[in-house]
Amino acid sequence: MSVTALDPATALVVVDLQQAFLGLPGSPYPVREVLDRNIRLAGAFRAARLPVVLVRVSFAPDGGDVVPGRTEQPRPALSYPEGWDAPIPELHEPSDLVVTKHNWGAFHGTDLDVQLRRRGVTQIVLTGVATSIGVESTARAAFEHGYHVTLAVDAMTDTDPEAHRGSVQRIFPRLGETGTTEEILDLLAKSR
């Protein structure tokens, strides 16, 4: 695990760290710790005048935009409390880009790629929940889109520690560089 560099045009992309998931029993890191690390990263990116993108998952009340298809696991209920898909106020600033997705990954069916390319972004630092679902899907697509991918592995968590570990140890090193929040903050400070 080592982050070697941050491009001059790097964006922080936070996946699914939204109201509904604050109560998740994150593993290996509690969601509150992950949120605190993301708040620090977002503040540093904003101070460096680099984009912060908050990706949220949301569905229409009638479920019309839920991805179809057969699965072996039951789909989540379509009845969500008001505001479940809202960004977390402590993390969100008006200058942030907010991207709404209806799939696991943040690229398919959204304008994320267009928004990043308009800003000249060549690298993304990924964080969020769940490591093995939304974050991994977004990391795979970012790699396929040609971005340099950096994954802040202590600023993400999962509901399953084995799934988190599998993504971090087996998948992420094939898609980019992995490191800690502190490593990324240090690189940001050195680049200013």
Image (spheres, rainbow, N blue to C red):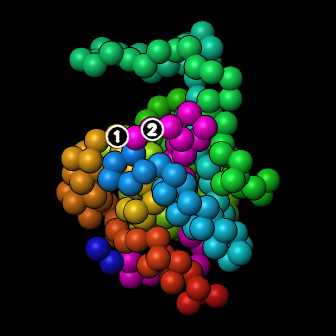
Q: What is the chief secondary structure element of the magenta stretch?
A: loop
Q: Secondary structure at mark 1?
A: loop
Q: Is residue 96 above or below residue 22?
A: below
The residue that appears at 56% across and 14% down in the rendered structure is 79
Magenta span has 13? yes
Residue type at the position of mark 1: Thr
- What's the CA distance linking mark 2 and mark 1? 7 Å
The residue that appears at 52% across and 14% down in the rendered structure is 78
Decide which of tag 2 and tag 1 comes sooner along the chain.
2
Q: Is residue 155 above or below residue 138?
A: below
Bin the neighbour count of mark 1 within 10 Å (Cα to Cα): few under 14, some 14-19, many 20 and up. Answer: some
Q: Label 2 belongs to which residue?
A: 24
Q: Nearer the viewer, residue 160 or 183?
A: 160
Q: Label 1 belongs to which residue?
A: 159
Residue type at the position of mark 2: Leu
The residue segment tinted magenta is 3-25
Q: Secondary structure at mark 2?
A: loop
Dividing the image into 4 quarters, which one contains the C terminus? bottom right
Residue 27 is left or right of residue 191, and the answer is left
Bin the neighbour count of mark 2 within 10 Å (Cα to Cα): few under 14, some 14-19, many 20 and up. Answer: some
Magenta span has 16? yes
The residue that appears at 21% across and 51% down in the rendered structure is 166
Residue 67, given in percent of the width and then of the height, sits at 45, 21
Label 2–label 1 contact, CB within 8 A:
yes
Q: Would residue 127 be visible to someone looking at this image?
A: no
Residue 182, given in percent of the width and then of the height, sits at 47, 76
Q: Is residue 10 above or below residue 94?
A: below
Q: Quadrant of residue 41?
A: bottom right
Residue 46 is left or right of residue 77, and the answer is right
The residue that appears at 60% across and 73% down in the rendered structure is 9
